[in-house]
Image (cartoon, rainbow, N blue to C red):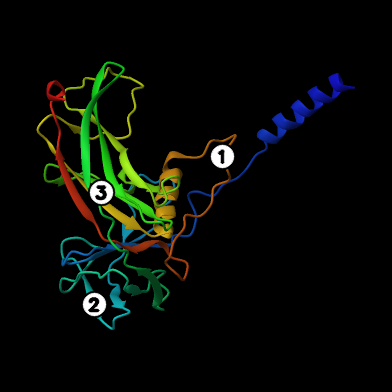
Amino acid sequence: MIRSIIPTLLLLWLSACTAPITIRTNDSKPVIVIYGCLTEQATHQTVRISGSSPYFDEVRNKPVSGATVSISSSDNRTFELTESPDEQGFYLTVRPMAAVPGVTYTLCVEVDFDGDGVVETYTASTVMTHPAGVDSIAIRPISIMGYKHYTLSFFAPDAPSTDYYLARFVINDTIETRRISDLTVFSDEGFNGQYFNDVALRYFDDTDNDFPSGSNMETDTAFSVRPGYRITLLFSRIDQGYFNFINQCREEKRGENPFFGGPPSNIETNIDNGGAGYFAAFSTTATEAVVPDAENE
């Protein structure tokens, strides 16, 4: 009986794996995408507004112009935004503003996105996080499969609460982590209330590495440095929603394991009225170190 059952189960499993599934990727109704991050720096804060494009479309999302955009705060301040004359869909606060830790900020976007003559309203609220202190960072040369790399570690205290962190990087004077896929995020699970003692955050290639064509060599990042370069860690505490948003965006880009991954799901957003994207606010601590020579280590 067992010998007859096993082939039957195998056939059922194979047929289940090959059942046709129709996924609409090209004709889905576009949705408005709103993305903005407030900082503690007194600057012209920005919000980008666009419309979603088909999954397999290779062009960028189409910018949305002509929106009325404002940000209000729980301490009774209002900041108007105006569209950049140089870039459609890119809105800046009329005057510089600096977000304050503990204050709630509400974004309001009014625009006729679907072109039906009726203005739609999209809102999102976020609380500005308190800064996360970093004592120092360390950069060390390492060798992987005969190629030279550098590891960046950090030293910092962690609060007893559950926290989520964002790490970005500046090489010399250029911020290299502009895309969501380049960001490093993690929770303090396993470290809660303890000290981050020499915890590795990121690996960097050496500028002299000459990887062979078609090589399968893959590292955490495509960023390259050399001895004498300055690397600045931009370290922030973020809310759980923004942490989930970044992780889900990265998972969507990489794709799920077809056998062991879960079914695809909508990316988390705090934009209401059917909008997509995220509105966040966080403080940043900057800590710098110089890439050392291997001989001096």
Considering only vertical position in the picture, is 232 above or below 36? Answer: above
Amino acid type, mark 1: Gly
Left or right side of 67 for 293: left
Q: Residues within 10 Å of mark 1 (few under 14, many from 20)?
A: few
Q: Which residue in the protein does label 2 denote? A: 79
Q: Residues within 10 Å of mark 2 (few under 14, many from 20)?
A: some
For marks 2 and 1 on the same chain, the one whose residue lies earlier in the sequence: 2
Q: Which residue in the protein does label 3 denote? A: 178
Residue 198: where, in percent of width, then height?
29, 38
Foreground of the two, 117 or 231: 231
Image quadrant assignment for residue 113: bottom left
Question: Distance of mark 2 from mark 1, alpha carbons?
Answer: 43 Å
Residue 272: where, in percent of width, then height?
45, 70
Foreground of the two, 159 or 220: 159
**Element type where label 1 sits in the image:** loop
Q: Which residue in the protein does label 1 denote? A: 261
Give the quadrant of the C terminus: top left
Question: Distance of mark 1 from mark 3, alpha carbons?
Answer: 28 Å
Residue at image x 62%, y 42%? 21
Left or right side of 113 for 77: left
Residue at image x 15%, y 40%? 289
Residue at image x 20%, y 32%? 224
Residue at image x 22%, y 48%? 135
